[in-house]
């Protein structure tokens, strides 16, 4: 079994409902077990600002799926949510990013793990710290990484 963290994000078509629905889909996958979900956060868009605020969360689960099989599952759930990419770094109905897969480092065309921007992004680190404050990445805990960045635009919202 493998330990996995993924990031969830949406800023279109009732973002909180998109996350709820994504979580229901994750829960119903036979290869995904012991799902835990962080708090939900409203966050200002990173990248182009002329788009709605996001709702973000992080999920932890264990899985027997290998990374690319898991990526297929995640992309299938994105597609069910009418994921459209109109613009690079633009608005989206649902984003499921594979953040961490055990302590593996993966660099292939379809997939980079750990997620390349995760340590810079409050909308990833804050919900990740809800689930795994003492997890170590690059010799520092998630809490230490979090303490280095500005998270003043993150608002916890009721699930
Ligand atoms: N900004 C926020 N706040 N949350 C996201 O999930 C998110 N996802 C993205 C970009 C467009 C980079 N900005 C984001 O892909």
Image (spheres, grey):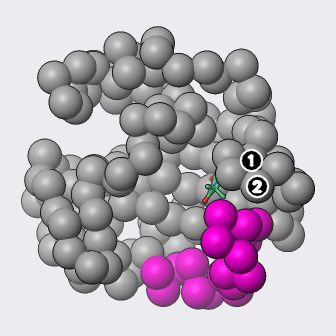
Residue 150 lies left or right of residue 33; in this view the side is right
**CB under 8 Å between callouts 1 and 2?**
yes
Determine the residue positioned at 11% across, 59% down. 1
Asked if residue 48 lies in the magenta stretch, the reply is no
Determine the residue positioned at 64% across, 22% down. 151
Q: Which mark is residue 48?
A: 2
Q: Residues within 10 Å of mark 2 (few under 14, many from 20)?
A: few
User: What residue does disc 1 label?
Assistant: 45
Q: Is mark 2 within 8 Å of ligand 1?
A: yes
Which residues are the magenta region? 75-93
Determine the residue positioned at 57% across, 45% down. 57
Q: Position of residue 5 (x, y in %)?
A: 35, 50
- Answer above or below: position of 28 versus 123: below
Between the residue at mark 1 and the residue at mark 2, the CA separation in whole angstroms equals 7 Å
What type of secondary structure mainly makes up the magenta span? loop
- Answer above or below: position of 127 versus 69: above
Q: Nearer the viewer, mark 1 or mark 2?
A: 2
Q: Position of residue 130 (x, y in %)?
A: 47, 27
Query: Residue 77: in sight, yes or no?
Result: yes
Q: Which mark is residue 116?
A: none
Dot 1: what SS?
A: loop
Asked if residue 85 lies in the magenta stretch, the reply is yes
The quarter holding residue 67 reads bottom left
């Amino acid at each position: 079994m493998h330990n996995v963290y993924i990031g969830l994000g949406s800023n279109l078509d009732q973002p909180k409902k998109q996350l709820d629905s994504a979580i229901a889909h994750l829960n119903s996958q036979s290869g995904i077990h012991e799902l835990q979900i962080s708090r939900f956060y409203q966050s200002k868009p990173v990248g182009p600002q002329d788009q709605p605020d996001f709702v973000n969360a992080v999920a932890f689960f264990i899985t027997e799926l290998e990374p690319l099989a898991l990526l297929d599952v995640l992309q299938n759930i994105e597609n069910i949510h009418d994921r459209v990419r109109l613009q690079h770094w633009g608005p989206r109905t649902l984003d499921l990013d594979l953040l961490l897969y055990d302590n593996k480092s993966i660099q292939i065309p379809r997939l980079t793990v750990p997620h390349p921007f995760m340590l810079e992004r409050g909308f990833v680190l804050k919900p990740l710290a809800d689930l795994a404050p003492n997890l170590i990445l690059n010799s520092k805990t998630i809490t230490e990484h979090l303490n280095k960045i500005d998270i003043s635009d993150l608002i916890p919202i009721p699930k």
